[in-house]
Amino acid sequence: GFQATNLGLAVEEINKMLAWSLNDEPLTEDDEITDPEERKNVKCTIFLGYTSNLISSGVREVIRFLVQNKFVSCIVSSAGGIEEDFIKCLAPTFLGDFALDGKNLRSRGLNRIGNLLVPNENYCKFEEWIYPILDQMLKEQIEDGTVWSPSSIIDRLGKEIDHPESVYYWAHKNNIPVFSPALTDGS
C-alpha cells in the first residue's frame, strides 16, 4: 500500500544516513575537522518526525523499533503522537472497518481512528494515569524549582509508563530527546 511504500523509502533514507560519515565528504580548506579518524566518527543527526496517525494506525511498532535500537537521534511529534502511544500501553485498541458509522460507534462509546476502534474508557484510563504524575511534577516544580519543558515532561512520562511497547519508554531509556512544541494541544 501507499504507506508501506513510503515506509520502505524512509528505511532506505535512514540506512543512507546511518552509513554516512564526514569522511564521505571531500575535505575543504574551511573544514575544522581534518583528521580522517575523527571525520569517520562524525555521523548524521537523525530527526524522526511524525503526527498522531502514525502512532494510532499501525506504524507505532516500527517507530518504537527505531527508537529502541537507537536508529534515530531525536523525535519531533504532535501531542497526539505522544498521548496515543501511552493510551495504547494502558488499554487495547481494536480492529474495525473504515466503513463503520461514526455516529453509531460514538453512541456505543467507541471512537474510530481509520479502521481502528478505541473505547472511550481508554481515554479515561489515560487521564487516571497522567493526573497523579502531573500532580507530582507540580509538587517538584513548587518545592524543588524544577522547570518542565515539553521535552522534559515527555521524558518523565516515558519513565513513568515503564512499558516496553511504548516509543517514549525507549526514548527515555536511550536518552533520545523528544520535541513537541504544542504538547498542550493534546488531551
Image: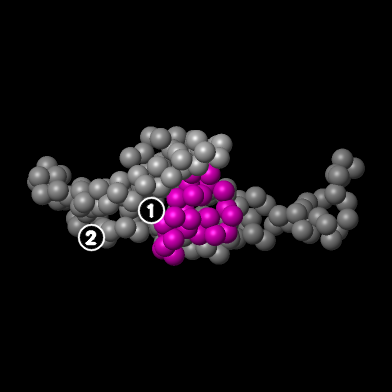
Closer to the N terminus: mark 2 or mark 1? Answer: 1
- What are the residue bounds of the magenta stretch? 152-179
Looking at the picture, tell me which residue is in the foreground, 108 or 61.
108
For label 2, the crowd category at 10 Å Cα-Cα, with few meaning under 14, some 14 to 19 and many 20 or more, is: some
Relative to 40, is 184 on the left or the right?
Answer: left
Q: Magenta region's main secondary structure?
A: helix
Residue 114 appears in the picture as rendered:
no
Q: Quadrant of residue 5?
A: bottom left
Q: Which residue is mark 2?
A: 95
- What residue is at 50 percent from the left and 35 percent from the top? 142
Q: Which residue is mark 1?
A: 85
- The quarter of the rendered structure image containing the C terminus is top left
Q: Residue 166: say if magenta.
A: yes
What secondary structure is marked by label 2? strand
Q: Amino acid at mark 1?
A: Asp
For label 1, the crowd category at 10 Å Cα-Cα, with few meaning under 14, some 14 to 19 and many 20 or more, is: many
Residue 75 x/y as whole percent: 53, 48
Residue 59 appears in the picture as rendered:
yes
Residue 73 x/y as whole percent: 60, 52
